[in-house]
Amino acid sequence: MNTPEVIHTQIWEETPEPNNPFAAAACYCHGYDVYGNLLGKATWIE
């Protein structure tokens, strides 16, 4: 099995699910929790 490609950036950080390295458990954009904090507060247009 091939090892997944690792890309490093200062803008985006993803923490993988424990059982699936291709599914993100948490995503951070500039330190903000995208799924936990931002998407729940954004309107459809945003």
Image (spheres, grey):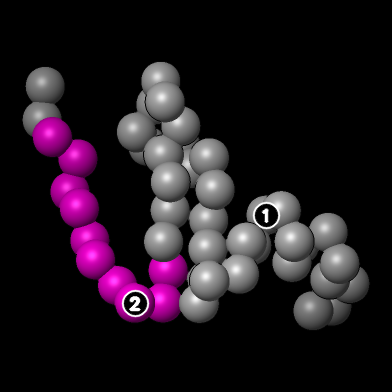
The residue singled out by tag 2 in the image is 10
- Most prominent secondary structure in the magenta stretch? loop
Q: In which quarter of the image is the N terminus?
A: top left
* Marking on residue 35: 1
Percent position (x, y) of residue 20?
39, 26
Residue 44 visible (yes or no): no
- Amino acid at dot 1: Tyr
CB within 8 Å, label 2 to label 1? no
For marks 2 and 1, give the CA distance: 18 Å
Q: Earlier in the sequence, mark 2 or mark 1?
A: 2
Percent position (x, y) of residue 21?
34, 33
Disc 2 element: loop
Q: Which residue is drawn at 19% across and 40% down?
A: 4
Residue 30 magenta: no
Q: Which residue is drawn at 41% across and 20% down?
A: 19
Q: Residue at x 79, y 79 (%)?
A: 46
Residue 5 magenta: yes
Percent position (x, y) of residue 7?
22, 61
Magenta-colored span = 3-12
Judging depth in this view, the residue of 1 and 31 nearest the camera is 31
Quadrant for residue 11, please give it.
bottom left
* Marking on residue 14: none
Disc 1 element: helix
